[in-house]
Image (cartoon, helix red, strand yellow):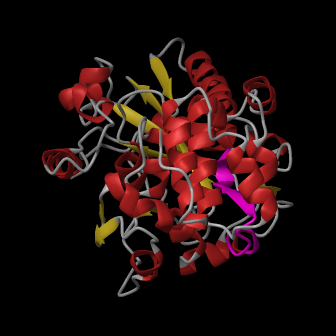
């Protein structure tokens, strides 16, 4: 339950100013909530107890600081939640890329500049303006950079509801947006929490290639392609490799099929425009990148955190799932003796998919 607050004209004006300043800075929506995340905390610990976070140990190591904002930042009384659209208007059609096994699919959020940098800088500018207007209130800015339950906070702040795929959905904007927060010691008026509008639809559950959405509103990260291609450090489980298709960094299937995304709007941020043709680049081209080329071509991108080794691992799996064209076999054989055991393992698996006569893994 939201805390009951008396109407304060000065606070109301400040809240209206914050929304206006947020829009001026490029946010599509700004909302306010208190710090009561009791229900979300219960769901979080149930999820952790089922080990559905896989190797993401950071999800549990902070204990209740993730679900209790005033433990993470003492003195926090309100959270300002903001969202920013990221769907690039001129990127190749996602479904066309997914339907062409010769191409590598990169989640649309990662095609341009690292959103952490763009979003955090804007949030900090908003926080600075709030501090100036209030003669020095305390603020701390987050954008997927600390133990914060951003989706439950955004839901309580009226920005949308957590859908069956566990992403945040908005009735007029779909789900193609980033979230960020400002923790503050101000006591701001709470917005009305968003209500759920998923209804009986389960398109996201049905489309998931690896069946990672094990039940409505329940995601097993260990089966999620985003986790497998980004978070997982070691070998991708054998049974899941064929299901990954040509997805080499993340997966957008549950968003692509969601009916609410017919209302999604393209971003106005040039920083989120595709770089180096990553919206529709061939797998063989990407597989030829040296480590220097990888670092150069992913400078300022969220993809860089993956590292060259796991980049090659992911592409090797995708090449194993495409047709056995000469160019594909040649590309794989050129890395059959890669210095990395992780890369070699996935390359040999891919070659074995194309020929029963491939030499076994050394």
Q: Position of residue 315 (x, y in %)?
A: 64, 49
Q: Nearer the viewer, residue 247 or 112?
A: 247
Query: Left or right: where does residue 67 sit relative to residue 346?
Result: left
- Residue drawn 22% across and 47% down? 44
Query: Left or right: where does residue 108 sit relative to residue 138?
Result: right
- Residue drawn 32% across and 40% down? 34
Q: Nearer the viewer, residue 136 or 289?
A: 289
Q: Position of residue 267 (x, y in %)?
A: 76, 54
Name the residue at the bottom extreme. Answer: 200
Is residue 264 depicted above or below 358 in this figure? below
Name the residue at the top extreme. Answer: 136
Whether residue 63 is visible here, answered yes or no, is yes
- Residue drawn 44% across and 44% down? 32
97 part of magenta stretch? yes
Is residue 207 depicted above or below 19 in this figure? below
Number of numbered discs: 0
Whether residue 30 is visible here, answered yes or no, is no
- Residue drawn 62% across and 19% down? 128
Q: Nearer the viewer, residue 37 or 289?
A: 289
Q: Position of residue 302 (x, y in %)?
A: 64, 35
Query: Left or right: where does residue 225 sit relative to residue 73?
Result: right
356 part of magenta stretch? no
Q: Magenta residues?
A: 96-111
Query: Left or right: where does residue 114 sit relative to residue 11?
Result: right
């Amino acid at each position: 339950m939201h805390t009951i607050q008396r109407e304060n004209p000065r606070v109301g004006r400040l809240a209206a100013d914050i929304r206006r300043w947020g829009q001026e800075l490029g946010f599509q929506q700004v909302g306010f909530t208190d710090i009561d995340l009791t229900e979300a905390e219960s769901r979080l610990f149930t999820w952790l107890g089922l080990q559905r976070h896989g190797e993401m140990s950071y999800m549990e190591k902070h204990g209740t600081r993730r679900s209790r904002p005033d433990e993470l930042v003492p003195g926090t009384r309100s959270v300002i939640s903001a969202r920013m659209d990221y769907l690039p208007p001129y990127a190749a059609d996602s479904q066309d890329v997914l339907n062409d096994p010769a191409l590598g699919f990169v989640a649309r959020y990662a095609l341009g500049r690292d959103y952490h940098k763009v979003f955090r800088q804007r949030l900090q500018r908003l926080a600075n303006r709030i501090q100036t207007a209030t003669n020095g209130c305390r603020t701390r800015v987050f954008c997927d950079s600390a133990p914060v339950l951003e989706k439950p906070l955004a839901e309580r702040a009226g920005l949308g509801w957590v859908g069956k795929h566990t992403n945040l959905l908005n009735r007029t904007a779909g789900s193609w947006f980033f979230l960020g927060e400002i923790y503050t010691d101000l006591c701001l008026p709470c917005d009305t929490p968003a209500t759920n509008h998923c209804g009986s639809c389960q398109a996201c559950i049905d489309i998931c290639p690896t069946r990672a959405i094990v039940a409505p509103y329940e995601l097993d990260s260990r089966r999620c392609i985003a986790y497998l291609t980004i978070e997982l450090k070691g070998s991708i489980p054998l049974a899941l490799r064929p299901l990954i298709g040509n997805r080499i960094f993340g997966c957008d299937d549950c968003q692509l099929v969601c009916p609410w995304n017919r209302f999604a709007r393209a971003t106005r941020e040039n920083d989120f425009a595709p770089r180096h043709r990553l919206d529709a680049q061939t797998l063989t081209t990407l597989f030829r990148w040296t480590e220097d080329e990888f670092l150069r071509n992913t400078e300022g991108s969220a993809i860089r955190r993956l590292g060259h080794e796991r980049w090659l691992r992911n592409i090797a799996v995708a090449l194993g799932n495409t047709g056995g064209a000469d160019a594909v076999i040649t590309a794989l054989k050129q890395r059959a003796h890669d210095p990395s055991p992780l890369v070699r393992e996935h390359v040999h698996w891919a070659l074995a998919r194309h020929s029963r006569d491939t030499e076994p893994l050394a």
